[in-house]
Image (cartoon, rainbow, N blue to C red):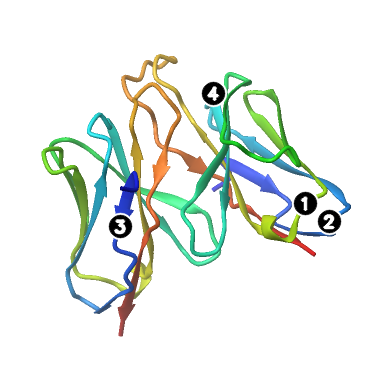
Amino acid sequence: RKEVEQDPGPFNVPEGATVAFNCTYSNSASQSFFWYRQDCRKEPKLLMSVYSSGNEDGRFTAQLNRASQYISLLIRDSKLSDSATYLCVVNPDNYGQNFVFGPGTRLSVLP
Amino acid sequence: ETGVTQTPRHLVMGMTNKKSLKCEQHLGHNAMYWYKQSAKKPLELMFVYNFKEQTENNSVPSRFSPECPNSSHLFLHLHTLQPEDSALYLCASSRLPGVRPLLSYNSPLHFGNGTRLTVT
């Protein structure tokens, strides 16, 4: 089983839709979790960290489910500008530098 | 955003050339990383430097040689590369736990804008 898995998509949704992505991780000792967004041919940019209690930033909500070893990202009221690849990143050890990236989920928001 | 800057943005080199990629971070971080991103593959960690000491070398071929003269600068020296080394090379930095101001968890990675390398 791969360390971090994501559905590669693409997810094609109309503007205004709500879309959710899941990401599963294999190391139950993982401590830190992040969602990054990557536009075509550009560097990944931090979208949000994922906290145990879940967190929300505007239209974006991230959740962590330790029992089932997955994190999720919910995007409400999708905009055309949300079209990108969303990368799930897991750090198995708070004190290490081993950031493990998922393959990414491609989202296309259509007019 | 100029937190992490990489040069050059694009590089085309022959298999016999020697070139270097440069990365500089202005965020006060103490860990720096090189990642490789090939088409349709996840980011692959190549090297990690922690307080200028290399702490990770992910079985990278010796034709890639990193150098970290201080906690703000990172280089990747390239020589006798192969066409399959063509990829996007990303530099990143982070702040490790225990560094003032004290962190109890690892801060996220901040990436530079990458060097798109083509080996001909």
Pinpoint residue A77: horizontal percent, then vertical percent: 19, 70
Give a yes or no on whether discs 4 and 2 share a subunit.
yes
Q: Earlier in the sequence, mark 1 or mark 4?
A: 4
From the viewer's perspective, is the residue at label 4 or at label 2 nearer?
A: 2
Relative side of A42 to B115, left or right:
left
Residue B54 to residue A45: above or below:
above
Relative side of B60 to A36, left or right:
right
* Chain hosting mark 4: B
Please tell me whether mark 1 sits on a helix, a strand or a loop: loop
Where is the C terminus of chain B found, in terms of image quarters? bottom right
Q: Earlier in the sequence, mark 4 or mark 2?
A: 2
Please tell me whether mark 3 sits on a helix, a strand or a loop: strand
Q: Amino acid at mark 3?
A: Gln
Q: CA distance from mark 1 to mark 4?
A: 29 Å
| Badge 2 vs badge 1, beta-carbon distance below 8 Å | yes
From the viewer's perspective, is the residue at label 4 or at label 3 nearer?
A: 3
Q: Residue at x 74, y 52 (%)?
A: B8
Q: Which residue is mark 4?
A: B30
Classify residue A12 by image quadrant: bottom left
Q: Amino acid at mark 4?
A: Asn
Q: Residue at x 18, y 42 (%)?
A: A69
* Chain hosting mark 2: B
Q: Amino acid at mark 1?
A: Leu
Give a yes or no on whether discs 1 and 4 share a subunit.
yes
Pinpoint residue A26: horizontal percent, then vertical percent: 27, 41
| Badge 3 vs badge 1, beta-carbon distance below 8 Å | no
Q: Which residue is mark 2?
A: B15
Q: CA distance from mark 3 to mark 1?
A: 31 Å
Q: Which circle marks residue B81 in the picture?
A: 1
